[in-house]
Image (cartoon, rainbow, N blue to C red):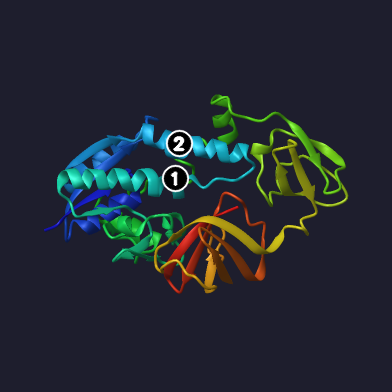
Amino acid sequence: MEKVVLGLSGGVDSAAAALLLKRSYQVRGLYLDIGLGGSGAADAAAVAAALNIPFETADIRAALGEAVCAPFAAAYLAGRTPLPCARCNRLVKFPALLAAADRLGAAWVATGHYARAGGGCLKKGMPANDQSYLLARLTRAQLRRCLFPLGGYEKVQVRALAAEAGLPAARKPDSMEICFIPDGDYPGWMARRGEVPPPGDFVAPDGTVLGRHRGFHCYTLGQGRGLGVSGPHRYFVSAIRPETNQVVLSDGSDLERTLVRCEDLNWIGADAPEEPLAVTVRLRHSRTESPAVVVPDGDRAEIRLETPARAPTPGQLAVFYRGDAVLGSGWIV
């Protein structure tokens, strides 16, 4: 049997992935330690013990800090809304798994993501749980060694599998926060690093001052809650201006776009096109997928949408699809 190194977090997804992989592979569990303590490592070790698979940990704090945490803070300070999981997958998580696989003589690496891979290609998982968007920065070389055993399962099926096998993670709640900010308070996390802009003005599109903001890093395009500004209509964030320390508020009618620009393209399921390419595109981690044409320009591209999208956000990913296949992605600018 071939060997596979599985990223084992202690949650139900990676536990069920281990259970499924054991049917065809020699599985070794690897817990990626980011230095926050908690029960994660113990939970992962308990899953490994229950399935009788070898288990070890890898300290990824330095790599995470350099490749993910520092750019995360820098993006907010530049008025963007970062997507740390997509950066981490390509630059930290999968490199750590592959390094362990090389050391242990394993041909494959695996995670509990809801997606499918094969031959360097990436495809969607089941519609209710698809996570291909967050994996769209992986390279073809990385994908050629990836297994995603949950790609054909819904979450409810995965929990049932884990419960039937008596795995301790079967009833563990899902983690919805950024792993290095478990309380979800990213402005507080930035403040503890000493990296926050000062309060400034909320302004209308014509420059009229509407109130004071807590720091422009606390807001994202399209946001309509938590603004604390009253007026003749509901307000939404329509622009963030780091250079003047202003957050622009409007009635939201100016948020729709049919043209989106992106850069740092990563082509997976297609070679870099030289001509306009018809695709469907996701502009955020959701099920919303819109017909569009990608017009390439070297490492940049314009995305021309058939119907307007609300608040495409710099710092997020544009992911291009053809059917279930991921063709590529680019960072929205």
Place of residue 116 in the rendered image (x, y in percent of width and height, measured from the top left): 34, 64
- At mark 1, the secondary structure is loop
* Mark 1 or mark 2: whose residue is earlier in sequence: 1
Residue 266 at least partly seen: yes
Type of amino acid at the residue the image marks with label 1: Ser
The tag on residue 32 is none
Residue 269 occupies quadrant: bottom left
27 to the left or right of 150: left
Residue 289 at least partly seen: no
**Foreground residue, 46 or 183?**
183
**Foreground residue, 183 or 235?**
235
Of tags 1 and 2, the one toward the viewer is 2
For the residues bearing labels 1 and 2, Cβ distance under 8 angstroms: no
How many neighbours does mark 1 have within 10 angstroms: few (below 14), some (14-19), or many (20 or more)?
Answer: few
242 to the left or right of 88: right
Place of residue 183 in the rendered image (x, y in percent of width and height, measured from the top left): 51, 35
Q: Name the residue under label 1.
A: 175
Type of amino acid at the residue the image marks with label 2: Phe
Is 276 drawn above or below residue 70 in the view shown? Answer: below
Residue 199 occupies quadrant: top right
Q: Which residue is drawn at 86% across and 48% down?
A: 206
Q: Which residue is drawn at 48% across and 42% down?
A: 178
Q: Name the residue under label 2.
A: 180
Place of residue 294 in the rendered image (x, y in percent of width and height, measured from the top left): 55, 68
Q: In the rendered image, which quarter contains the N terminus? A: bottom left
**Foreground residue, 193 or 120?**
120
153 to the left or right of 309: left
Is 235 drawn above or below residue 268 in the view shown? Answer: above
